[in-house]
Image (spheres, rainbow, N blue to C red):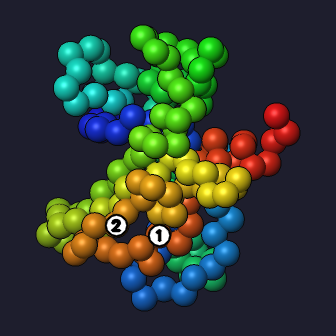
């Protein structure tokens, strides 16, 4: 299993489509829903939380699919955190959040995920894209995520916002599409 360090608080499921330089854009079809059948490679992910002495958290998933040239040649990524680490619950229904619980405002103001893409060691190992995607933001009654939210950023000089073709989270999908 791959081992990954996690500094951010919460992304339940996020789908990202990254454009590789020089390729034509295709309809990404990224909506926040996860279907393993849409990806070609899946990996288990174990988290070690920075600053935490507790045991590692297992059960995360990272799914990848390289599109064909006809589809645009982009890399599709689905990142799913285990519910034992973080979930979409908040308020009175929050699971496993001590103290004042996990409030909806936390999802809107502080939850994000950082993804760092690097070349292989054979190609120098340097970072080619560093992107932080906002988990959820309310834009006049419509919920958005990714680079359009408060915490979304591609810090210069590594990559640009144009390198992220689309992104979406499961909570964004649920709040915009599922009757509550």
On screen, residue 45 above or below 78: above
Left or right of 18 in this view: 32 = right
- Residue at (58%, 24%) from the top-left corner? 90
Give whichever of discs 1 and 2 has the lower sequence position.
Answer: 2
Which circle marks residue 92 in the picture? none
Residue 37 can be seen, yes or no:
no
In front of the other: label 1 or label 2? 2
Residue 106 screen position, x and y as percent: 48, 34
From this viewpoint, which residue is outermost toward the right?
A: 179
> Within the image, what quadrant is residue 129 found in?
bottom left
Residue 150 screen position, x and y as percent: 45, 55
- Give whichever of 174, 140 is nearer the camera: 140
Mark 1 → mark 2, Cα distance in angstroms: 9 Å
Query: Few, some or many C-alpha atoms within 10 Å of disc 1 (few <14, some 14-19, many ≥20)?
Result: many
Residue 136 can be seen, yes or no:
yes
In which quadrant of the rendered image does the N terminus lie?
top left
On screen, residue 29 above or below 97: below
Please say if the residues under marks 1 and 2 sit with CB atoms less than 8 Å apart.
yes
Q: Determine which residue is flagged by label 2.
A: 154
> Within the image, what quadrant is residue 91 found in?
top right
- Give whichever of 23, 168 is nearer the camera: 168
> Within the image, what quadrant is residue 116 found in?
bottom left
Q: Determine which residue is flagged by label 1.
A: 164
- Residue at (56%, 51%) from the top-left corner? 137
On screen, residue 95 above or below 67: above
In which quadrant of the rendered image does the C terminus lie?
top right
- Residue at (22%, 30%) from the top-left corner? 50
Query: Few, some or many C-alpha atoms within 10 Å of disc 2 (few <14, some 14-19, many ≥20)?
Result: many
């Amino acid at each position: 299993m791959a081992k990954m360090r996690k500094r951010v608080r919460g992304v339940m499921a996020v789908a990202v489509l990254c454009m590789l330089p020089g390729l034509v854009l295709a309809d990404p079809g990224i909506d926040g829903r996860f279907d393993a059948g849409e990806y070609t490679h899946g990996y288990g992910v174990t988290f070690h939380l920075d600053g935490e002495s507790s045991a590692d958290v297992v059960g995360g998933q990272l799914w990848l699919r390289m599109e064909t040239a006809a589809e645009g040649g982009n890399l599709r990524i689905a990142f799913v955190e285990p519910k034992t680490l973080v979930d979409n619950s908040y308020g009175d229904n929050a699971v496993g959040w001590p103290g004042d619980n996990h409030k909806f405002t936390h999802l809107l103001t502080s939850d994000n995920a950082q993804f760092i893409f690097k070349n292989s060691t054979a190609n120098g190992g340097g970072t080619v894209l560093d992107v932080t995607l906002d988990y959820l933001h309310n834009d006049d009654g419509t919920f958005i995520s990714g680079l359009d939210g408060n915490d979304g950023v591609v810090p210069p000089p590594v990559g640009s916002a144009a390198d992220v073709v689309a992104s979406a989270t499961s909570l964004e999908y649920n709040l915009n599409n599922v009757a509550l």
